[in-house]
Image (cartoon, coloured by chain):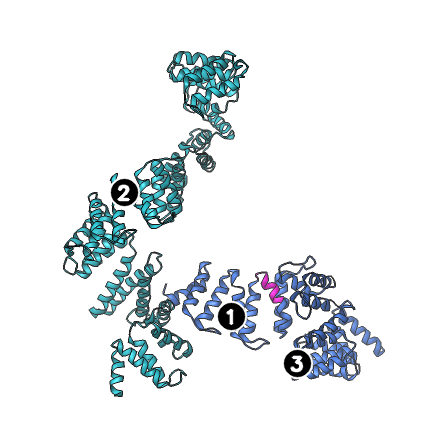
Amino acid sequence: MVNLMTPKELNDIGDQYFYGQGVDKNIEVAFTYYKRAADQNNSIGLFNVGKYFLIKNNVKDAFNYYLKSAEAGYGLAYVKLSEMNLHGQGVKKNKKKAFKMLEEAVKLQEIESYHLLGKYYLHGIGVGKNEEKAKSLFELSAQNNNSEGMFLLGKLLLEGKSIKNDFESAFFHLDKAAINKNINAINYLKDLYNEPHAYLKKKSTLYRQEMWFYYDELLASLDDVGALMRTAYAYYYGNEIVKINFDKAVKYFKILHGLDEVDGYFGMGVSFMYGQGVTLDYERARDYLVIAANRNHPKAKNALGDMYRLGKGVEVDYAKARDFYLEAAKSNDEDALINLGLLHYRKQIKNATDVLALQFMTKASEMNNSGAFYWLGIFYDKAIGTERSTDLAKRNFEKAITLGNVGAKYKLAQLIYDETNSDKAGRRKVDKNFNIIKDLLIDYINNPLSQDVNVLYSLYLLGEMYANPSFSESSPKVSRYYYESAAERNFAKAMVRMYEILMTREPKRALYWLKKASEKPADGEGLYLLAKVYDEGLLGQLKDYVKAQEYYRKAAEFNYQPAIVKLTMQK
Amino acid sequence: MAKIELLDKAKEAFLAKNYRDAFALLKRLAPSSPEAAYYLGLMYYQGLNTAIDDNLAFLNFRLAWEGLHEEGIYMLGRMYEEGRGVDRNYEQAFKLYQAAHNSDNAKLRIANFYEYGKFVEKSLTNAIKIYNELQKKDNAFAMYKIGSFYFNGDGLKKDLNNAYKWLNKALLAGSTEAMNHFRIIGTKSKNDIRTTQEVYQAGKALVDKGFIEEAWPYLEASASEKYLPAIITMHDVYKLGLGVEKDLYKAFQILKKYESYDEAQIYYLIGKIYEYGEGVDSSYVLAARYYELGALSSHEASIKALKEIRGY
């Protein structure tokens, strides 16, 4: 029965045992099948027996079988023979012979041989160096969809000394090789973009970083752990060139988890904790984070602290949070240090002290954490654990800003503004400060990370500054623009300003703003003004004594003096 | 030369657009020939070989009317309708159009009066009756009107198949209005070889003469081909009240309609309207938003206006 099997069938079954495909791997069994194919003088069978001997380190027999396979016309056998000649396996080292063997393989149109022969020409192995010949062999290889050929062709076009360099097609071939998952090409391209090749120097840094990331992500798709980590974190936290994308972050964290990498556990943990790219699931979050924390991942410990501080799936428990933060802080985790500082600052734990708040924050700032500098700015401004020092507050805010903190811009602007107003500063100083404030606030309001409430105050402050004649750029027009921007975002004080601005030119609209301001008043001013409108019948509004009284009273409730005076005088 | 021969010569010159000779001959003949007076009136009316002169046009058309010249009667009606050389008077105009009962041009005006309810009560049925009668005489404009009634579902049940049948018929009969219609809806017909600019200029010329209703399809056709001057002209018609009642809100709406063309000049003008509250509540926030859009395409005026309103 078995005698009826064709060599192809024999080789296929042999392969199944040799590589353990669908059966238990057993190269001895594989050998019996290969051997039967070889005994029928089947070139692939002969080759496979050679392969078997090679793995058994029996190079002599391996060489002989490869030789027989080659003689039977199998190209890949020549490739092997060339390799063995080159390294002196089972035969005396002989570069010339190595070269000749490969030439034979090329004659037999063996796809795996083109780029190898090209390499022999490139490096002058058993033949004189010849870049021209190497190039045409690489081209032939690339045309046959061999990604190593594409890589070598691209590299040669870029680095070749005697051939004409062609950067554009070099990058084309390299990219094609990279897309075909050729690791050499990917790593080579990353280097080219990292330490920019002359051809790339004209491109912007941003573009180069983007391309580097693109190839690093390709590398990640080949399960390179370093690349997986870089890519996962880039998508999770975002940076100048990578937009936050939780779906993608989770995709890579999952792979890392599958590879039993601690960052995979941490990543899956935080993703489940905040429902980023996965459905929110505190229990699973906890499970993943505990594993990562047990493997000493500081960020995982910090995240567990956050779970207790924020009450994510557990009762809020600041003491437990502190314990986790302290664990993480042992490895100087910046976030944990800041969190500890804040627990003390907010007096959320027993024996909290301002001094410790300041100490933790200072420690975090030593890691150059922008958030730590922001809080130090606040602490120095509010005299937390230290004497008040606006100078140190400013310096810390400035440092936070240079490190990319957004909120510090608003805080610094406010600090300078209060200082300028209380100082009775000279005109020139006011102007200088206002220009600084203006730049800070405009940056702040245009930043997507700014906080809505602070944006409103920023807009209002800009409106005030532009209305101040001491400011060299003062302009009623710009002032109105900022007041109006704040009013449009429901800031009551700004609506009152809009009332004043529009009352003569657009009384209807002015009244609209005043009434709107009185719906959710922040202070008594708008209410008092509306009372006056009803009291005196201003802006075409009919007199309404009852309403006037009502709004005077409401204004007085805000302790607005003119309203109180008015009501007292009526009595 | 006999008077009749001279008149033929004058008409010949007129039709050959040899206005100089025609004008000289017609001027001599007009006092005694109603037909000559009619042609001379046309020359004053359109400004051919002479400046437009409404008074002289009116006087000559009246001479033609006295001589019972049908087209002359029709033109006198036009003078009353447009209020040129005489106070506008739709009643007079309507009666004159009725008197010129053999003139297709006059019939078209009567149909127009019914369509828009000028002097007479609005009646699309009556208007359609007249257009249908004229359509049988191969009148291209009447065909166009029937097509557009089907297209818009006014007076006739909306029916796009019939609409295109009639619009195409009108097109073949040489109706410029049909051509404009196809251009407005973005399917320029093959026999329409006018450039966008030419279409616009035809519209602009009509605006300059105060024929806003007639000008509109030309302006809309060129505007639909993203021809900015057409949009600006339409805007100006309402902003300045050229031949229509001034209406700042309508002027604003025209710009808004073409906002999607992503033209800096349009953004800029909308910004100005918001800044100065022309026809809308003033809003610096919206003004700045539109200047910003204009500034995106490096439009100098927008950049300047933005800096002035926003401080950077």
Secondary structure of the residue carrying numbered label 2: helix
Q: Is mark 3 on a helix, strand or loop?
A: loop
Q: What residue type is labelled 2?
A: Val
- Distance (Cα) linking label 3 and label 1: 30 Å
Up the image or down, A526 lies above or below A287; here it is below
Range drawn in magenta = B218-226
**Taking B233 as reference, is A317 above or below it?**
above
Parent chain of label 2: A
Q: Is residue B300 left or right of residue B145?
A: left
Q: In front here: A532 or B35? A: A532
In the image: residue B132, left or right of residue A140: right
Observer-side mark, 3 or 1, equals 1
Q: In which quarter of the image is the C terminus of chain A?
A: bottom left
Look at the image and tell me in which quarter the N terminus of chain A lies. Answer: top right
Foreground: disc 3 or disc 2: 2
Give the class, few, some or many, for how many residues have Cα within 10 Å of label 2's Cα (few <14, many ≥20): many
- Whether residues under marks 3 and 2 lie with C-beta atoms below 8 angstroms apart, the answer is no
Chain drawn blue in the picture:
B
On whether disc 2 and disc 1 are found on a single subunit, the reply is no
| Res. A213 visible in picture | yes
What's the residue type where badge 3 is placed? Arg
Q: Is the magenta stretch mostly helix, strand or loop?
A: helix
Residue A521 figure quarter: bottom left
Look at mark 1 in the image and give the residue it sits on: B252
Q: How many marks?
A: 3
Figure colour of chain A:
cyan
Q: Is residue B203 left or right of residue A520?
A: right
Between disc 3 and disc 1, whose residue precedes?
A: 3
Give the residue type that dot 1 points to: Phe
